[in-house]
Amino acid sequence: MGQEKDLFADYAGQVDEVSHLLFTKNGTGFDFNEAFLGREADLNVGFPGLTVSADFTGDGLDEVALFEEMLYTPNTVPHFSRSIIRINRSRGDHFLPNGSWFSMADSSLDFQHVDFSVAGDYNQDGYSDIALFYNDPDTDLLTVYVLQSEGSGFSDPLVWYTCDRNDFNFTALKFACAGDFNGNGKPDIAVFYNYFGTTPDTRQSVFLFESGGSSFSLLPHVYDATKDTGRLYLVLDDRLIWHLKPIAEEIGWNYVQLLSWCKPNFSGKGRINGDWNFMNEYILLFRKGKRSMMLTSDLTTTHSWFKETAPQTNFKKDYLKKVHPAQMPVNLIRRWISRTPGQVILDPFCGAGSVCIAARDMGRDYIGIELSEEYCKLAEERLALQ
Ligand SMILES: C[S@@+](CC[C@H](N)C(=O)[O-])C[C@H]1O[C@@H](n2cnc3c(N)ncnc32)[C@H](O)[C@@H]1O
């Protein structure tokens, strides 16, 4: 049997009055009582879909977090609004308003752009936190912010996960729910993804955001799986490096340096709009554990930039041809591997398998993980070609 829980509901009753109803189990069904009655003006449930309950104070009883946008109008010019989270504290059979635990200028965090809020003690400090799936249509990035509870207030929003909207589309998320799905004692978030794009992008999946204590990312798993002195190459575009560096460092990775892959044949697609043409990608290089030497190599220079043409469909050799939209040149990866200590190379987003091919060429063992069956097949075909 699962845990017994009460149910909570907001009820807009008589004019100007709002109540919280508490449904408690009586053995055969639910009884409900009016656990809070307030004037609508005092209890502004601005975003009912974001309401979450959890033990934010750590006192063993769950509180209710209400999201609202507060507009300051009469005497302020220009008018401005703030995003507020109010906490209603449970006293067992009734709620007491406990004031605002979070308040921030709307321009910094606008609840209009929050698709889901999910509560859980993500940092395992005994106080439940709130994860916000943030989807501002005016930006390219999608972000999961966590408001960490400190027992009597929430922290400023901390970035726990961020991605490019072309890689993982939050608008395709239908709902999210909390639970310890992998059984490791830490709260996760399951999201239901229903994306109808053009083949092979049509997907219906359940994705799991696993808490690593300070982020929702694969990086803690990759860190655990890496031997001391092992290296992590994180290939990113310029907008993501700022977010991912502190997340990786919090997990324990030691930052080494920023590398750059220059693509002289890039055909000029992307964020042009009169800015500089976007013809390189960045690589954050990290090390696990103490300082250790890189290997000597006759395949590459020691420059921190790498000039390598991006794969194209007209390339002669089959295994170098472009078959994946974000394919990397095998030679670029060979150059990195040639200087990197360690026998096993892991690529958890292996696409058409360029990293696996390069690892095999360099006499290393490799593990490639890929979501799309179609790309897995492509990787196997390319590996068989040489
Ligand atoms: C940038 S591409 C990698 C391309 C690869 N380096 C190559 O040269 O072919 C990223 C890949 O990660 C895959 N991917 C995205 N989310 C994933 C997940 N959660 N688990 C495994 N693969 C994922 C995508 O399908 C895509 O093929």
Image: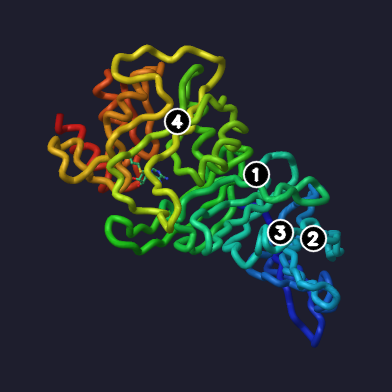
In front here: 141 or 40? 141
> Marks 4 and 1: in contact by CB < 8 Å?
no
Q: Is mark 4 within 8 Å of ligand 1?
A: no
Marks 1 and 3, how far apart at CA: 15 Å
Query: Which residue carries the number 4 mark?
Result: 259
Q: Amino acid at mark 1?
A: Tyr
Residue appearing at x 59%, y 31% in the figure: 249
Residue appearing at x 16%, y 40% in the figure: 315
> Marks 2 and 3: in contact by CB < 8 Å?
no
Q: Which mark is residue 122?
A: 1
In front here: 88 or 264? 264
Marks 2 and 1, how far apart at CA: 19 Å
Marks 1 and 4, how far apart at CA: 32 Å
> Marks 4 and 3: in contact by CB < 8 Å?
no
Query: Which residue carries the number 2 mark?
Result: 87
- Does residue 337 show up? yes
Camera-side mark, 1 or 3? 1
Camera-side mark, 1 or 4? 4
Left or right of 208 in this view: 44: right
- Does residue 26 show up? no
Q: Residues within 10 Å of mark 3 (few under 14, many from 20)?
A: many
Q: Is mark 2 within 8 Å of ligand 1?
A: no
Q: Amino acid at mark 4?
A: Leu
- Ligand 1 located in image quadrant: top left
Residue appearing at x 56%, y 34% in the figure: 248
The local secondary structure at tag 4 comes to strand
Q: Which mark is residue 53?
A: 3
Residue appearing at x 41%, y 16% in the figure: 341
Q: Earlier in the sequence, mark 4 or mark 2?
A: 2
